[in-house]
Amino acid sequence: MSARPRRKRATSPARARKAPARKASASSSQHATIVYVHGIGAQPPPEELSQAWDRALFGQWQGSATRMAYWADVLHAPADADARTLARRPGPARDAGEAGLLPPQAQQYVARLEARYGLSETANARGGPKKKILPAPLREPVARWLMKRFIRDTAAYFFDAQKREAIRERLRAQLDSDLGPYVIVAHSQGTIVAYDVLREARYAGLEIPLFVTLGSPLGLDEVQDHVGSPLRRPRGVAAWANFADRFDPVALDGALANDTQPKGEVDDVGVSNPGLNRHEAVAYLAQPAVRARLGDVVGAVRGRSVGPKVIAKDVIRATDRPAEQRYPVLVELMQGEDGSVDDLRQRSATIHGKIVEIVGRVSGASARQAEELAQVDPLLRYVGAKLTAREIDHLAAGHGGREVFRIWRNARKRALLRQSVRTLQADAARGGYGATGESIHWAVLDTGIDAAHPHFVTHESVAAAWDCTGRGAAKALERTGRKAAKDADGHGTHVAGIIAGVQKDDPRGLTGMAPRAKLHCYKVLDDEGGGDDLWILKGLQHVYDLNESSATLRIHGVNLSLGGSFDPEVYACGHSPICKELRRLWRQGVVVCVAAGNEGSVPVETPDGTLDLQFDLSIGDPANLDEAIAVGSVHKEKPTLFGISYFSSRGPTADGRAKPDVVAPGERIVSASSARGRAGESDYVELSGTSMACPHVSGLVAAFLSVRTQYVGRPDEVKRILMENCTDLGRDRYHQGAGLPNLTRMLLAT
């Protein structure tokens, strides 16, 4: 995309002569990170505020190229949301007794500023002239409220050393002398914070091509009494541009050039903001003069990100928060040309070592301590870790585009809770064709399986069990004894019982869709039904490796009755890390069945109370994977009459593809319970959800493959046969998919 033509910068008639400034090289500022520093009052959450500033300045979100030094929570409770737009509360009086709580010096500071702005009743009683802040009557209450807020916040900053240090630390957390260059864009009181921090000796060598101040109070004598007079351009700053609206009450003295030593160290630019609140940050940022000045330095154009997009959006949202906090991330590795396992292992080991080195360097910890701090967990194509915002920046800056392809959030997935064998014609197929799932192996990635449950004893259904919820490789679990695979949550056991097994000593009792199929248990969700993406990836990689190490497929299919929300701004639909691994399994020959999600009905607060509203475009991740079989839910006995379950997620996908693929019984499904033996609990329990619908299709396909073995390892053909032989329920394609699978018809057609 071509660069926007440069425009002359708008200036006020009284703008001071600009002194020569150090000029940063074009190469060094090409990917400058812009650091925002907000001003007075309570603010929206940091990610919301940062994106609002991005949109005002560039027209769209700028990814990892911009960061917000967020400090509003140091002075204001989050509930103080009235400052989302400062003009909405024009005139609250100062809190009762507030002045008495301030130390004497602070009280003097408040009194001087109140007198300057005509807010002091004492000054008016003495006949002192009242400052006319804004010309229009409607604007004066806004200005008076702004000044009261400004006086209160700056008093807290100047006279509370603990809060002042906490606020400064928020900006320091976004700056790193080993990274850069940085462009600092500060508004209101944020200009005081930025000026104070940038003048610290540690940042003398930091490369800052441009320091932008918007609506700054640095020209006030009362402020200079605390930051120092005259003002001096910080040593690392190559150029300083100051923008002020002459009706902005906070920037009462909007010209800073005459206050600097030597004179003219600041380029003062006059602007005119729209609306009543002439101090509003987004109004300043949207000014053509401000946009042009930023564009001159960082090479940014509207509609184009100003930096490399190595760090995913949801990681940036999280890391705009306190610097000491650690965030779970997935580091996706760049792959070599050969893509061999040895090459992947070497790359994973290399990034593992570099993460430990970065954590040690940034935190000052030893290599052993850094390993524990980061909790590094390497896989073949990903490395999981818990990193601070600064460590993430170092990893992206030092290795992005070379060893590291993308840094994703290690998101959480959850279990999807809400006479079905007959509904899918599995009983007829079992009697007529012997479709029992014999010799077919299916992986269940869930909360675990109670391997000792009587339902799985008759056919020794659980062939193997693995725990993926700890660091390191998947750990094998025993099938019997004290250390046998267990399921404290119960979700995985219920899902597994739908696929395989049979009620012990009762041939007419409850049975799985493929009673003789073998189950491979992968515990990827914890005892509360939630799990990290890394755990799921670990299980999928283990399945892939088992198949690669054998001449034939050892595991023929996987069931994922889990999922999470999908943000199309973070990754393309169906291309999340989990989707990529599932696609690799599918191409290996493994059938992938995924629950569509339970987001078809969402509770919404209305004036009439909470109502459940139905939504399209509610297919979650990884159900939006094109290659997978996404399964929605219907009534277990009368699907044609009752249609699609109210909770079942509907299509299309976010990029317009038809999903779900099929529907299966998911309402009030009775299956094995891991709570057996507890007081008042039976061996079986009734649950609902697409989590229950998905294993119906997994079991059905396992039963089909046990008879039509020629289709083993050919998931594309299996999916085609499945969908071509469904019963049409007469519902919308984006609700029912191809309809209700019919195992007998599938066998007849082949």
Image: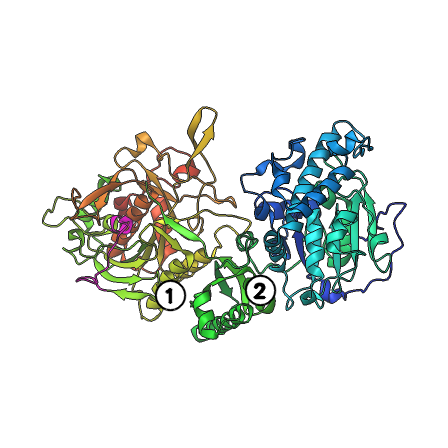
Q: Nearer the viewer, residue 554 or 428?
A: 554
User: How many other residues sit within 10 Å of disc 1, few (<14), some (14-19) or many (≥20)?
Assistant: some
Q: How many marks are shown on the rendered structure? A: 2
Q: Which mark is residue 471?
A: 1
Query: Is residue 133 among what the camera can see?
Result: yes
Given the image, on which type of amino acid does mark 2 rest?
Answer: Ala
Image quadrant occupied by the N terminus:
bottom right
Q: Nearer the viewer, residue 270 or 131?
A: 131
Q: Main secondary structure of the magenta part?
A: loop
Does residue 495 lie above or below 577 as drawn?
A: above
Q: Pick whichever of labels 2 and 1 is earlier in the sequence.
A: 2
Does residue 124 lie above or below 433 as drawn?
A: above
State the residue at coordinates (55%, 62%).
Answer: 392
Given the image, on which type of amino acid does mark 1 rest?
Answer: Arg
State the residue at coordinates (75%, 31%).
Answer: 140
**Pointer 2: what residue?**
396
Query: Is residue 749 among what the camera can see?
Result: no
Does residue 570 lie above or below 651 as drawn?
A: below
Res 651 → quadrant: top left
Position of 29 with respect to 496 (left or right) is: right
* Residue 628 picture location, percent across and down: 40, 52
The residue stretch that appears in magenta: 478-496
State the residue at coordinates (35%, 61%).
Answer: 539
Residue ranking furthest to the left? 505
Q: Nearer the viewer, residue 433 or 382?
A: 382
Q: Helix or strand or loop: what does disc 1 sit on?
A: loop
* Residue 445 picture location, percent across and down: 33, 55
Residue 483: in magenta span: yes
Residue 471: in magenta span: no
Measure the C-alpha gap from mark 2 to mark 1: 23 Å
Position of 518 with respect to 329 (left or right) is: left
* Residue 624 picture location, percent across and down: 45, 48
